[in-house]
Image: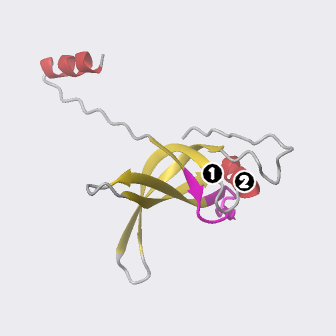
Amino acid sequence: MLRLFMDSMKSKGMCAMVALNKVLIAGRLTRKPELRKTPNGTSVTDLLVALNREFVNIDGEKQQEVCFVDVVVWGKQAENCTQMLECSSSVLVEGRLQLDVWHAKDGEKRCKLRVAAERIQFLDRERKHSQEKLPEVAQTF
């Protein structure tokens, strides 16, 4: 289907570029989320998710590496995260890549690539709130 679209665009002398910005990660939090509010009152929290990868190297030895991913969560979903999640909680994050650019106090330009969460699922079932249904809040951006 996509190929037909691309061929159609080329035959008309048009250039079509397809872009997909979707991220899906599952890992454990490295710290408890803390809720903040923007000046207009919107809730926001930042998560740091550790992704563990085990593999066998060229010498046949088991190796392990960890990748740390920054995730920003907004609105009611951020509030749920701060209420329900602890350090080392398991989460499944669905979102998109977002590049944040700012100028530091020293005047230097800084950039940070992170995941803007669209949906977070809490994977730990044995929580201190185990009597409550674990919320899953989806936001559309």
Q: How far is disc 1 from disc 2 in space, using C-alphas?
A: 17 Å
Colour logic? secondary structure
In the drawing, what numbered circle is on residue 8?
none
Amino acid under label 1? Ser
Q: Residue furthest front?
A: 60
Instruction: Look at mark 1 in the image and give the residue it sits on.
Output: 90
Residue drawn 69% across the image and 62% down it: 35
Element type where label 2 sits in the image: helix
* Corner quadrant of residue 119: top right
**Which mark's residue is nearer the viewer, 1 or 2?**
1
As for residue 74 lying within the magenta part, the answer is no
Q: In this picture, is 23 found above or below 84?
A: above
As for residue 44 lying within the magenta part, the answer is yes
Disc 2 residue crowd, few under 14, some 14–19, many 20+, Cα 10 Å = some
Q: Is residue 108 left or right of residue 92?
A: left
Instruction: Look at mark 2 in the image and give the residue it sits on.
Output: 79
Q: In this picture, is 47 found above or below 77?
A: below
Magenta residues, as a range?
Answer: 27-45
Q: Which is nearer the N-term, disc 1 or disc 2?
A: 2
77 vs 105, nearest the viewer: 77
Amino acid under label 2? Glu
Residue 5 in picture, x, y percent from top left: 26, 18
Residue drawn 48% across the image and 52% down it: 115
* Corner quadrant of residue 23: top left
Q: In this picture, is 33 found above or below 20?
A: below
Q: Quadrant of the C terminus?
A: top right
* Corner quadrant of residue 67: bottom left
Residue 135 in picture, x, y percent from top left: 74, 41
